[in-house]
Amino acid sequence: MSSSPVIDLDPPPHPDLATASLFFDFDGTLVELAPTPDGVVVDDRLRDRLARLAKATNGRVAIVTGRSIAQIDTLMGHHAAGLAIAGSHGAEWRTERTGHVTPQRSEALESAAAELRAFADLEGLLFEAKSLGVTLHYRQCPDREADTVAMAERVADRFGLQANRGKMMVEVRLPGDKGRAITTLMDDAALRGTTPWFFGDDVTDEDGFAAAQALGGAGVLIDPPRATAAAYRLDDVAALRDWIDAVLAAAEAGTEGAA
Ligand SMILES: O=P(O)(O)OC[C@H]1O[C@H](O[C@H]2O[C@H](CO)[C@@H](O)[C@H](O)[C@H]2O)[C@H](O)[C@@H](O)[C@@H]1O
C-alpha cells in the first residue's frame, strides 16, 4: 500500500492583529495533554497571554474545543468570561452578543451515556461526562482501543448520535464540528470580514483548519508533521506559547507584521 509523503509546513508568520480573529483548540494546543481530563494545568501566564491577545485584537479571540463550555469555565476561572467559546465541538457557543446558545440534552444522549458508562466501568476505562456528550478514554489501557471505538460507534449509530475519535479517546455526542463552530463565530458582526486563524492539534481540528482557510485565513497544526489541512505548523504547546509571546511583543512594541 502506498501513501503520499507528508510534507512539513513552515511556522506561521505573525498575523496582522488589526484584522485577525484567533481561534484556539484547548487540549494539546493551549495546554499540555495530561493523563486525565482533570489533570491539565492552566497557569496564569496562559490566562495573561489570552487576555493580551484579546486586547490586541479588540476581543477577537475564541476557544474552540471538544470540551463543554462548563468545563472551560471551571478550568479557566473568571478569565473565560472575556473570551468567546465554542464548546462540545461547536454544538454550543457563547459570545458577548449571543450569550450561551446550547441545545437540550436529548433522551437519546442520556440512554447512550448510561450504556457507555456501564461499558467503561466493565472495561476499566476513564468515563468523562460532558454537557452534550461523553468521552471514553483509553490512555491508561491502550489495548482496549479497538473494542472501545467499536462500542462507541455502535451506540452512536443506534441512538442517532455522532462518534468521533481523538487522542487516546472516543466520544459520543450531539452533532457538531469545529468547522461549523468557526463559521458560526465568524458570522458575528464583530468578526465578520476578519481573517480567521485556527490553532489545533487533533484530528477533530481538521474541519477547523479547512473552515479557516475557506474563510480566507489559515490553520496551524500544533503537532509533529502529518497529513493535514493546516497551512502552517508548530511542534507543540511550548512552541505555540513562544510564538504567541513573539507576536505580542511585536504588537505591543508597535512593530507587528501584516500577514
Ligand atoms: O478539542 P479539545 O479542546 O482539544 O478537546 C478534545 C478532548 O480533550 C480532552 O481529552 C484530551 O486531553 C486529555 C487531558 O490532557 C487527555 O487525557 C486525553 O487523552 C485527550 O484526548 C477532553 O478530556 C475531551 O473531553 C475533549 O473532547
Image (tube, rainbow, N blue to C red):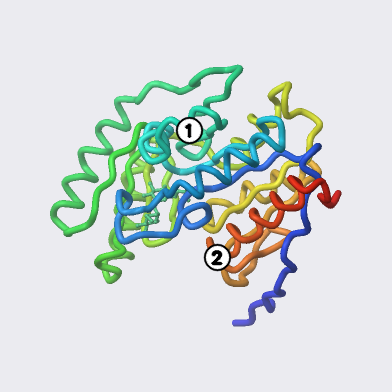
Observer-nearest of 85 and 78: 78
Q: Position of residue 221 (x, y in %)?
A: 63, 60
**View extreme (right): residue:** 258
Q: Name which of mark 1 and mark 2 comes first in the sequence.
A: 1
Observer-nearest of 241 and 36: 241
Dividing the image into 4 quarters, which one contains the N terminus? bottom right
Specify the amino acid type for callout 2: Asp
Q: Which residue is mark 2?
A: 236
**View extreme (bottom): residue:** 1
User: How busy is the neighbourhood of tag 2: few (under 14 within 10 Å), some, or many (20 plus)?
Assistant: some
Q: Residue at x 31, y 64 (%)?
A: 139
Find out whether the residues at labels 1 and 2 contact each other: C-beta distance under 8 Å: no
Question: In the structure shown, which secondary structural element does the residue marked by tag 1 occupy?
Answer: helix
Mark 1 to mark 2 CA distance (whole Å): 23 Å
Residue 80, disc: 1
Q: Which numbered disc, 1 or 2, marks the residue closer to the eye? A: 1
Disc 2 Cβ-to-ligand 1 distance below 8 Å: no
123 vs 207, left or right, is left
Q: Position of residue 15 (x, y in %)?
A: 78, 49
Observer-nearest of 233 and 259: 259
250 vs 50, left or right, is right
Up the image or down, 106 lies above or below 224; here it is: above
Question: In the structure shown, which secondary structural element does the residue marked by tag 2 occupy?
Answer: loop
Residue 56, disc: none
Residue 9 location, quadrant:
bottom right
User: How busy is the neighbourhood of tag 1: few (under 14 within 10 Å), some, or many (20 plus)?
Assistant: many
Up the image or down, 32 lies above or below 115; here it is: below
Q: Position of residue 217 (x, y in %)?
A: 77, 46
Q: Residue at x 72, y 74 (%)?
A: 7
Residue 167 location, quadrant:
bottom left
